[in-house]
Amino acid sequence: MSTEAWPPVPARITEAEVGIGEQLARGGASTVFSVLGQRKTLLYKRYNKPRNAVDLDQLVGALGGWGENAIDHVRGTLAWPVATVVDGDQASGALVVRAAAEFHLTLPSGRVKVRDFNFLLYEKRAEKLGVPRATDREKVDLLRGLLDVLLWLDEHGFVHEDLASHNLLWKLDPPEVFVLDCDSLRPLAGDSRSPLYTTVDWTDPRVLTAEVERPDRASTSYVLGLLAPRTLVSPYWYPGDPLPAERFPAALTELVGRSCGPAASRPSLTEWGRGLDAASAQTTGTVVEPAPVRDPAVVRLADRWVFAGGLLFGALVAVFVLVSFV
């Protein structure tokens, strides 16, 4: 992937200069549009309410200071902000990296959507829409792919504040992950002036109870501790639910337990990496049926609503503004 003349846009740009195409997704915090012309590798994420531009400028500036290998990595794995769209001294939106076509799918209706983790978690319903089900080994490999992205972010000093199923895209052959909503990245060593948008069902309880102001490294470990059983056991899994030995790799059991506990005891990303590497060898390489962890009637009803919600709101932008701290 060449970095020549990329990104094809200055670090700051007005909305009139963007070249806005068709609307692709709309949610509570923003609306996403395609971008015309030479900038078609980008998307325009327009905020419903203007934000302080300083945090976005910092993310855009970080990208501009990296070399070719780092930029290539970003383009393949992260919807990183490459330009702040400004209105005076406020950010009205951001131009972000667009996920490759392999992370999209065409529904029976002909509509093209991103393939987010909701299609992986709610796999039986997704299969009816033409999405092949992943094997247990492929799921572990996807989790490992996500971990690699998170490790890269951590090594470069960033934490993602809204890790959730609708912000994670996936593909197979080979299994790879692309992370959305990267204007929710925060420098680990700094504060943020931006409002916090997070998804309650995936948010560290320490954030929900105001024990900490914003997600941190321990919060990332907590989300991994939800993703592993929700991907491999049941999308309705919650801390305290069983981890059936016939469905869940033993190498991950202790890590999941620790990830849901006190922050100081949660596994590091390195520990998660060792666990996922071992877990891959403990899988069967076959499609495994989800485990019933709750009342079947309740699960069926929740399945309809949650999956429909994922399809509607989980496309290209963090649109579940369920928790907002300013």
Image (cartoon, rainbow, N blue to C red):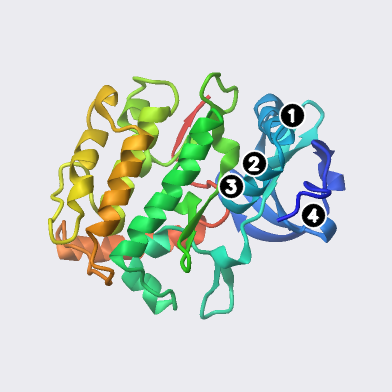
Determine which of the numbered discs, if any, sits on residue 39 in the image. Answer: 4
Instruction: Looking at the image, tell me whether mark 2 or mark 1 is earlier in sequence order.
Output: 2
Instruction: Looking at the image, tell me whether mark 2 or mark 4 is earlier in sequence order.
Output: 4
Cα separation between marks 2 and 1: 28 Å
* Discs 3/4, front: 3
Neighbourhood count class around disc 4 (C-alpha, 10 Å): few under 14, some 14–19, many 20 upward: many
Q: Number of marks in the image?
A: 4
Above or below, 239 against 280 in this view is above
Instruction: Pick the residue in front: 54 or 178.
Output: 178
* Discs 2/3, front: 2
Residue 41 image position (x, y, % from top left): 73, 56
Cα separation between marks 2 and 4: 20 Å
> Element at badge 3?
loop
Please tell me in which quadrant of the rendered image residue 54 appears: top right
Residue shown at 43% from the left, 21% from the top: 213
Cα separation between marks 3 and 1: 24 Å
- Tell me whether the residue at label 2 lies in contact with that at label 4, contact meaning CB atoms closer than 8 angstroms: no
> Element at badge 2?
helix
Residue that badge 1 annotates: 90
* Discs 4/1, front: 4
Residue 311 image position (x, y, % from top left): 47, 62
- Tell me whether the residue at label 3 lies in contact with that at label 4, contact meaning CB atoms closer than 8 angstroms: no
Above or below, 215 against 241 in this view is above
- Tell me whether the residue at label 2 lies in contact with that at label 3, contact meaning CB atoms closer than 8 angstroms: no
Instruction: Looking at the image, tell me whether mark 2 or mark 3 is earlier in sequence order.
Output: 2
Cα separation between marks 4 and 1: 22 Å
Residue 208 image position (x, y, % from top left): 35, 29
- Tell me whether the residue at label 3 lies in contact with that at label 1, contact meaning CB atoms closer than 8 angstroms: no
Residue that badge 2 annotates: 70
Determine which of the numbered discs, if any, sits on residue 78 in the image. Answer: 3
